[in-house]
Amino acid sequence: MRIRNAGKVTDGLWCLGSEASNIYLLEGDEESMIVSGGMSYLVPTLLEQFTEFGIDETRITKLLILHAHFDHIGTIPFFKRRNPSLEVYASARGWEILGMPKAITTINNFGADVAVHMGFEGVYSQYDIEWRDDISGKTVVEGEHLGVESLEGIVYETPGHSSCSVSFYIPTIKALFPSDGGGIPYKEMILASGNSNFTKYQESLEKLKDLDVEFLCADHYGYITGEEAKHYIRESIQTARARRSEMEEVYLRSRDMEAATRELVERFYRGNPDYLLTPEIFSGVYRQMLRHIVKELE
């Protein structure tokens, strides 16, 4: 079952944010932890939800970045500046990307563009949410344990969607946080998004497929429970194979990467005009995926 409303997932776990962009809160008796950073425009929504759900923001001591794309780190500058003692965790590659001036410019520009696209253009004038060079934190690696009290999870390095992607799994509640590396549960579909390296993306899905999952906590379009959660990663593996075949077929028809990108993006938006990314940003996503696939084909 796909659940797209904010609220309590299970004891100690909250889904927060909007339908298109989610973060998760692990709530212990003494401290809490945020998993993923969502889009920048979520800040006022999250503050309202803290009040609505009785969440004590002062107990949030940790925040885990699953990968450093703009739509997964947007709220972090606000919360880190609001609480300088907040410990922020990311992969080594994640911190490397977040130290690049060009990457920071892209993060801020894309965040502002999507805020306008989603009807939240005023958020940047109300809150200090732009990334600058004042955000730092700790590095996580494969197999590291992180969490709050009984809600301790394990970090898995799962590159492919991004070169810096990690996933997070909490055995006690059987909750998996694969971010976009697990496939995006848009509408009733699964969108395969092996942006940086489609082959590594598929390998990372294989790495996660045998975990016992009752709650599949996606960063976009909510979380999944029940039988669908148990089989979601295996379904994502099948979807990734089909998406790769589609991209190969479209490219080989013309051997023109730009023409193939246009066709794939136009095909997608004809049926999905309300998707969270603008067509311009999504074109960049497809171009990046195709670049890797074409390199292997040729």
Image (cartoon, grey):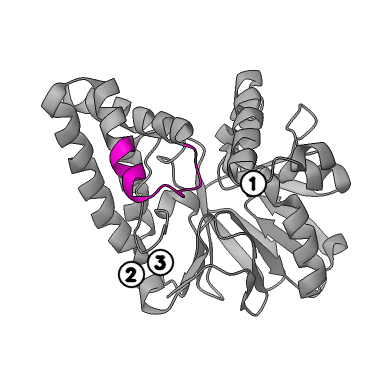
Front label number (3 vs 2):
2
Residue at x 79% of width, y 63% of height: 48
Residue 55 makes an appearance in the image: no
Kind of residue at disc 3? Leu
Residue labelled with disc 3: 211
Q: Secondary structure at mark 1?
A: loop
Q: CA distance from mark 3 to mark 1?
A: 38 Å
In depth, the one of 128 and 9 nearer the eye is 128
What is the span of residues highlighted in magenta in the rendered image?
A: 266-278
Residue labelled with disc 2: 231
Kind of residue at disc 2? His
- Work out whether mark 3 precedes mark 2 in sequence or the reverse, and give the earlier one: 3
Residue labelled with disc 1: 119
Q: CA distance from mark 3 to mark 2?
A: 10 Å
Q: Is residue 143 left or right of residue 190?
A: right
Label tally: 3
Q: Position of residue 271 (x, y in %)?
A: 33, 50
In depth, the one of 82 and 139 nearer the eye is 82
Q: Position of residue 176 (x, y in %)?
A: 50, 64
Q: Is residue 269 magenta?
A: yes
Q: Position of residue 63 (x, y in %)?
A: 71, 52
Front label number (2 vs 1):
1
* Quadrant of image for the C terminus: top left
Packing grade of label 1 (10 A; few <14, some 14-19, many >=20) is few
Vertical position of residue 298 compared to residue 62: above or below: above
Residue at x 35% of width, y 28% of height: 287
